[in-house]
């Protein structure tokens, strides 16, 4: 009687194929789970920062929603043209979210943004600087709040919804430039018509698509 030679080649190939299929399935599940986690992280960031900006409007705070351009920023209690003193951003890029970054640092402004300023949630993607020191910072860097995909969050004040040309240019994490527009509801009305819009461009990094994560849109 012949001795059993162990597994045949075909048996080994079948086993390898089964293991590969299982690993493939597991890696798809891991990727899906991490995608869900990134989206959750982005939603938390947008909601937290949006809530902090909502508080700025109170009279004993900034007294207004931040303008979408830093050069229009006025200090708490209308104490003067803070943004102009800092120096106009030279490049007209990412200016809405930079304006928010500066506004929450002004003296007399109450905004708890400590939870949204970890190393992976702020960046200066367009590498621009104010001519003076940004309050509460050691440099003039005009940072942006970014989402987990490395792209800037977009901020647009309702005053610029109708004519967003001056605030529409955004540079992404990969240095590509896109144009943003304020979001509208299916009936054609702007989302949050009387205050501001804050959103992440979502996993696709394209503004205005279905995966955008918009603050307070419900
Ligand atoms: Ca910047
Ligand atoms: Ca998108």
Image: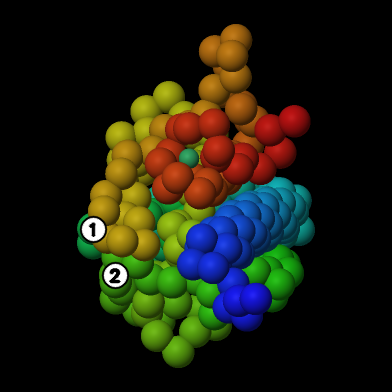
User: Left or right of 143: which side holds 50?
Assistant: right
Residue located farthest toward the left when viewing the structure as drawn: 90
The front one of 106 and 182 is 182
Residue that appears at 31% across and 61% down: 174
Crowd class of label 1 (few under 14; some 14 to 19; many from 20; radius 10 Å): few
Query: Which mark, residue 132?
Result: none
Identify whether 189 is placed above or below 159.
Answer: above
Tell me where residue 13 appears, x and y as whole percent.
51, 63
Left or right of residue 125, residue 177 in this image: left
Classify mark 2 as within 8 Å of ligand 1 or not, answering yes or no. Answer: yes
- Identify the residue at the far bottom of this view: 138
**Contact flag, marks 2 and 1 (Cβ < 8 Å):** yes
Q: Position of residue 136 (x, y in %)?
A: 55, 82
Residue under label 1, please give it. Answer: 91
| Quadrant containing the C terminus in the rendered view | top right
Q: Which mark is residue 128?
A: 2
x and y percent of residue 117 in the render? Answer: 60, 74
Distance in Å between CA atoms under marks 2 and 1? 7 Å
N-terminal label among 2 and 1: 1
User: What SS does tag 1 mark?
Assistant: loop
Q: Secondary structure at mark 2?
A: loop
Q: Nearer the viewer, residue 146 or 17?
A: 17
Q: Is residue 196 visible?
A: yes
Q: Quadrant of residue 214?
A: top right
Instruction: Name the residue located 49 percent from the left edge and 67 percent from the top edge.
Output: 9
Residue 84 appearing in the image? no
From the viewer's perspective, is residue 167 above or below residue 125? Answer: above
């Amino acid at each position: 009687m012949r001795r059993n030679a162990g597994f045949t080649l075909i048996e080994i190939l079948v086993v390898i194929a089964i293991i590969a299929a299982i690993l493939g399935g597991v890696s798809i599940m891991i990727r899906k789970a991490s995608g869900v986690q990134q989206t959750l992280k982005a939603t938390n960031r947008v909601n937290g920062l949006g809530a902090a900006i909502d508080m700025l409007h109170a009279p004993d705070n900034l007294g207004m929603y931040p303008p979408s351009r830093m050069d229009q920023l006025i200090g708490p209690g209308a104490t003067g043209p803070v943004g102009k003193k800092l120096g106009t951003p030279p490049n007209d890029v990412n200016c809405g979210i930079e304006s928010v970054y500066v506004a929450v640092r002004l003296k007399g402004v109450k905004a708890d943004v400590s939870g949204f300023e970890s190393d992976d949630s702020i960046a200066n993607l367009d590498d621009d600087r104010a001519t003076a020191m940004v309050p509460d910072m050691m440099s003039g860097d005009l940072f942006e709040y970014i989402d987990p995909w490395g792209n800037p969050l977009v901020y647009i004040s309702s005053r610029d919804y109708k004519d967003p040309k001056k605030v529409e240019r955004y540079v992404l994490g990969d240095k590509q430039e896109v144009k943003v527009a304020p979001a509208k509801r299916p009936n054609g009305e702007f989302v949050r018509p009387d205050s501001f819009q804050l959103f992440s461009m979502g996993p696709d990094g394209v503004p205005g698509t279905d995966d955008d994560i918009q603050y307070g849109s419900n």
